[in-house]
Image: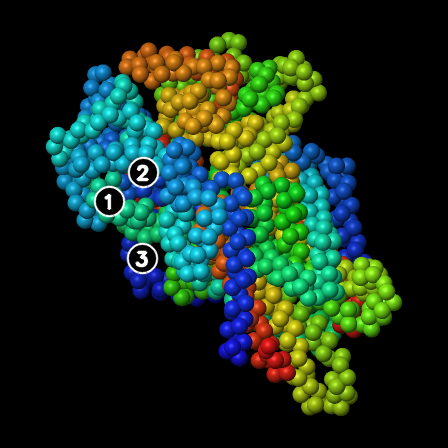
Amino acid sequence: MIGYILRRLLEVIPTVLLVLTLVFFALRIMPGDPAIAALGEFATPDAIARFREKLGLNQPLYMQYFGFIAQSLTADFGTSMNNGAPIGDLLGQALPYTISLALAATSIGIVIGLPLGAMTAVHRDGKLDAFGRLFALIGFSLPDFYFGILLLLVFSLHLDWFPMLGGGKGFFDQLHHLVLPAITLGLVMAAFTMRLTRSSLLEVLKRDYVRTARGKGVAERWVIFKHALRNALIPVTTGMGIYLLTTLSGTITVELVFSRPGLGTLLIGGVSARDYTLVQAGLVVFAFFVVVVNLLTDLLCAAIDPRITLR
Amino acid sequence: MKLFIHTCVAALLLSTAAMAESVVRVGVSQRDIGSMDPAFGIGNGDEFPMRQIYSVLVGPKNGTSDLTFANLQGELAEKWEMAPDARSVTFYLRKGVQWHRGYGEVTSDDVAFTIARMRDPKTGTAYSSNFQEIVSVETPDRYTVKINLSKPNPFFYAFALMPRFGGYIQPRKAVEELGEKFRQNPVGSGPFAFSAYESKQKVILKAFEQYWEGKPRIDQLEVLFLPETAARTLAFVKGDVDMIEGATVPGWQASLKKQKPTTVFDAGRPGGTWALHFNMTRKPLDDIRVREAIARAIDQNAWVAAFGDFVTPTYGVSPVGYYGALDKADLPADWPLLYDPAKSKKLLAEAGFPNGLTIEVFITEREEYKTNLLIIQEQLRKVGIQINMRVVDHTSYHNDIRRDLNTMVVYGSGQPPLTQAVLNAFYKSSAIVGKPTRNMNFSHYGDLAGNSDSLLEQANQEIDDTKRIALLKQVQIEILRQIPAYPLPSAAGSWMHDGKTLEIGFPVKAYMGTFTLAKASRLAP
Amino acid sequence: MNVPINKLTMIGTGLSALLILLAAFSPWLAPLDPLDQSFIAANQGPTAEHWFGTDSFGRDVLSRVLFGGRISLAIGILAPVLSALAGVWAGMLAGYLGGWTDRVLSRASDLLMSFPTLLLGVMIAAALGPSFQSAVIAIAVALFPRFVRLSRSATQVVRREPFIDASIAAGRGHLSIMLHHVLPNIAGPLVVALSLWIATAIRLEAALSFLGLGAQPPTPSWGNMIRDGMSDLVGDPWPAAFAGAAITLAVLAFNMVGDALRDLLDPETAA
């Protein structure tokens, strides 16, 4: 088990290296550089040249690239090219907000989506099913930033139940700030989970052993249903793992709408300031998330179903 | 629900005793702090906190933009005088002024250090050109500084020593001790001292107990980075912030006033310098008839209709209210920049475009730039000129216009309110983009269509005020007759505060980054 | 097949078709020029003259919503179709040939998947300069690995069928087999995915435009109308509200088509 995890984590290294390379060059294709972004409209060519020299941007590209890779391997993210702040600190401040948002949204997704999906599958074609499917359709169709704006207008501006800006200080305040963004992202997650649960449960329920049990009586049916749910959970877990990554991406617009600190805010700002070091580090963290989420998904599937072996 | 949540939060706040302090929150449109080191600060998001942290030797009177020497107000200096030949200025410092965080007294050595640092090209500041005319700085004692210039420049101080544009005095000890860290841990002598910074979120400043004018009445000042207009507006309407940097969206101010009647508009005047620069190396803009056709198709009244009295029409290269600016009465009878769409169409036909023409232009995503071009685009469409617009991000825009890549450049700049400053930056031949000394001459005027360098230099050095103003007006008419650019209406600095919660202490008629909140107070919790 | 599927299919298809038609014929349907500014008539809510009101430049919101549909739907349909053309082939190759081809293609698509979709869009748009084309490219690239994965796993299943080996034994070329045997067998789930990802692409386009990276002003798109409307959300929420409603409706319509198609292919789990 531990060997498996270690091997999986080792496999991450080439992926992360490729991400690093891609990001490194993609950033440098964009017009403008950190010096131009940082020095502003009054900058003279001389001042820009000096700033570039200080950041090492005057070196040949391959030198910069190898220097950067070497630095990355020692997990040294360096300092922001825009304002000199240590990247580690910037990420340390931002990450908890993004992670808590993604987790809260996922929790909302599970709490609403799983039971709703199970119930609609059992009461197939009933009123509840119709409601569930409509809910999923709408959840899928409402753009997250639009939904966020609506929530903000109603629950923050007019009703004044929730704060409008930032991420909050201290546990309760942070929780208070988390509610609306989490609902914004959680809706899609719930719609997704509901639909996935419903279809995979229906898939299992049509199998022979369940059909037989249905004919026999309530008690056995209940046992089998539990069994069926367990089986149905595997695709749901895998699907949600994949969707969690989409949710992570969704944090960008939601953070923007709610002026919330986080990785998305950090990266969007970084791109506009051509803060190479910041964007590079931020994307590596994102890539790392992707890998970890995939790994956790596989581990979770194995835990749910002992028949799955980890190779 | 609401009650419960509020009780929780209130309990939490009380426990940390945060309620006892008077806190003022200010929303700026920048994404993050760039630098709080005066050598590197740019934009309102940097300028606003820097103004609170640092002091200048002398500045315009609180809330005004008046740069006339006789009307200045002392900060670190209590007395100052200019030599009659305008080749030196002497400042006598106030005694006992303290640096933040125990860095000692502000002395003449700090002033000399600041000037040397800003002047040194190795520092890499964008403002070093403002200090190049200084040949030496004398510090005969702890409290006297004499600045000597290479040539007469009666407005030298207005470029180098004013709030914004790098004029803040910096502590030698702290700058040398902190090195690279200084930009994130600034030490000044202003009313508010730097306390904390949260990336992309806010900068927190605390009242400085030993401020020479006395401790400010506001205990804590928070500068929040709110780049999205919607978030900034909503937060202001709701009361989460007390002051914001406004938006350049037509009708925005009127609707804000309706939503929040206690809003006080702090219009910073004179406003920024805006112009549409024609790249005269590009066809068909090399043809003066085409340039005049464009100019004649633009009606500045459209801006007035959109923004009300927040904008004022501009006649010369600089907005009305700048030192030496052209006013309507100064314009000759046959002035080629006046709105006349019929003439515009005629000129286009003469230039060989009876069926109109298409021009490709790129523009930054910034609202104020885009809004200007959208209005121009629509007006030109009516005479048959199609503008194909491509929006790029702000950094790309700055980069690419300086590489001479655009055909027409919409540019807004917060220069010191002096016509000389505008002329130097946009119309001198050495300022042409693409040259090593380049600045913001996007039209190539000086190499093309005429050259006014010597007349401009004459105006720069003229000691007599009346003659200087006459010269400045003469240069502008000479330049604009060639239509290298079309001056756009000037938008006032758009800031607003909640009159119910915040009192600035004096009427505001200047840009927010030019005065401190040392006299401001919080009115309600 | 039962009645609800038909109903859903009909509503979804009808709605999608209607929206596409409205967008296609917007030059004839729009009551006013979507670019015409009028500051006297700015920021009006819905009136008899302007059914959806006017924006801050005094432009007619109904006309802009109609014209905006052209851009939003064009990008929303074009990007996934382009992406599918490339992705399906890559996925089929990977699934059919296996070995190194599979490893390289899978690793490449995993790599693309590890970028947050929106950020990928932001970087592509910043590098190419934001425009209609960059938006199409950004979304196509973002969806590409998803098509690869889907067609790869579907191909792997088909590849194990005996008739493929029989065809190989009969001496048919790989390309011919992929075209005549594999593609028709994996087409079902791909068509479902395509219609669902058109819905996703419309949402992505809106998000990119919302970040200022889609179609360029003054050309309206639903996303940039929301963005522009955001500036004066308190005073005049109408442009953003109508544009948002249009996006929701379009995404809903394509999702319904996708759902219906899925149910057709797999009636067991259908409603």
Colour treatment of the image? rainbow
Q: Which residue is mark 3?
A: B19
Q: Chain of mark 1?
A: B
Viewer-closest of C103 and B54? C103
Q: Chain of mark 2?
A: B
Pick whichever of labels 1 and 3 is earlier in the sequence: 3
Q: Which residue is mark 1?
A: B176
Say which quarter of the image contains residue C34.
top right
Q: Chain of mark 3?
A: B
Measuring 69% from the left and 33% from the top, which residue is drawn there?
C33
Binning the other alpha carbons within 10 Å of mark 1 as few (below 14), some (14 to 19) or many (20 upward) gives: few
Viewer-closest of A248 and B25? A248
C-alpha gap between disc 3 and disc 2:
42 Å
Q: Position of residue A89 (x, y in %)?
A: 38, 57
Secondary element at tag 3: helix
CB under 8 Å between discs 2 and 1 = no
Q: Which residue is mark 2?
A: B123
Measuring 76% from the left and 47% from the top, which residue is drawn there?
C20
Pick whichever of labels 2 and 1 is earlier in the sequence: 2
Is B391 rendered above or below residue B455?
below
C-alpha gap between disc 1 and disc 3:
38 Å
